[in-house]
Image (spheres, rainbow, N blue to C red):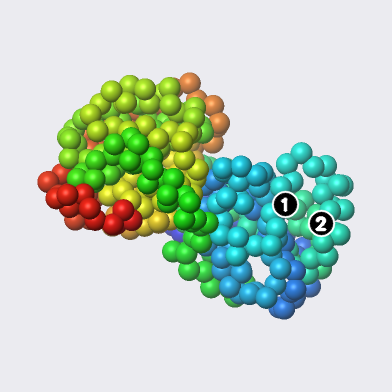
Amino acid sequence: MYPFTTQHRKVTPVEFLQLLVIRFLFHAGSATLACCRHVLYKINRHPGKILVFRTGMLGDIICAAPSIAAIKRAYPHAVLDILTSSGKPGIAGLDKLLDPALYHAIIDYSGIGRLQLLNLLKANQYDLVIQLPQTDAPFTRLLRDLLFFRNVAAAGWGWQFSTVRLFKRTQEKLLVFPNETDRLAAILEHHGIPVDRSVFDLNFMEEDTETLQRLFSREGVAAERKNIAVVVGAKRPQNRWPIANFRKVIESLGSGYNFILVGGPDDREMAATLRELPQVHDFCGRLTPVQNAILFGKCALVLSNDTGPMHLAYSVGTPLVALFSSRDFPGKWYPPASEFNHVFRTENVHCSLCLSDHCSNNICMQAIQPAAVATKVMELLCKSGYSPAQTISATGTTSWLN
């Protein structure tokens, strides 16, 4: 099961040989993991207790949410626990993000020694472990996890090798990678569990809606204008589009919209130059992820860097313009393919696919032109039926949830 397909482009002899090496390494790694799983694990089609293992931050969990929901639907009577590194209680914890009907307990392994964790998991007596692996997990880590979880449960699956780091430029040119939601769904479907990729089952609470409504009222977000959310920050500096470019887009769109800045507390200083613009409202650091999702559901469009909140936008079905750096393979973290989602990513950058967490000059992001972004924003707004001339109602008295 290859996690990629080949584009129909002219291939040089060298590139052809490189593709053969890539496919060989992928096949060898996948076959080794499959053989180990076949030897070490049994099949359990009626587990009473399941452990799902998924690491990562906000975006990683959003991408995995349809698969987690599918596991719960496939085993509705099983007790399902989630082992993760993003489970700490708080506004961004899994306990605040996913619908609690999906799981019994969230186990955060951050700061827990391996032996202590093993004893904790063994005491829970799981019948089945399912790993939803990171797309860039190296073969050695996957093999380590496969061996580790054999001490936790007699049945298990999910260890898929996805990324070969050789000949990255050839892969960028010739291979098409699925986005993370599709890749994880394919793992489940390979094991007979259908996945509805549109079901994210987030933990929407009435008090979250009320909190957002009060904030709209307090900040004077005008009901007669449609909302555009703008996500200005990102965890990695190289994923941040210059703030001056966001300003140019906002200025070019005119006064027909409310522009709502979304991000964490650390983004407030960066967004300061945008707050002086008309109809701009700074919500950075003031909402939980779920409240951000509700906010996105009230927007005509979201303009976002490649960061966690970007995934929340498409999870609620809001049109999205996403700005991607060239640090990673194209496609892997993209939103779902849709006429209402558009991705900007600069090709043919000499330092693309650096896979680095540090960048002193993100030329790939700087090369994305504000005029092109503004044009695409307007195109998607018109396609969605919104234009600056349209209003929610003459009096602003329509349902707040519209």
Name the residue beneath numbered marker 2: 121
Q: Residue at x 86, y 47 (%)?
A: 116
Q: Which mark is residue 235?
A: none
- Quadrant in the picture for the N terminus: bottom right
User: Residue 27's spot in the image, x, y percent?
Assistant: 62, 59
In-image side of 29 versus 214 (left or right): right
In-image side of 335 versus 273 (left or right): right
- Tell me the quarter of the picture where residue 70 sits: bottom right
CB contact under 8 Å: marks 2 and 1: yes
Q: Residue furthest bottom?
A: 46
Q: Is residue 68 visible?
A: yes
- Quadrant in the picture for the C terminus: bottom left
Q: Residue at x 78, y 69 (%)?
A: 127
Q: Is residue 34 visible?
A: no
Tell me which amino acid carries mark 2: Leu
Q: Residue at x 31, y 48 (%)?
A: 299
User: Residue 343's spot in the image, x, y percent?
Assistant: 34, 46
Tell me which amino acid carries mark 1: Ile
Q: Which mark is residue 107?
A: 1
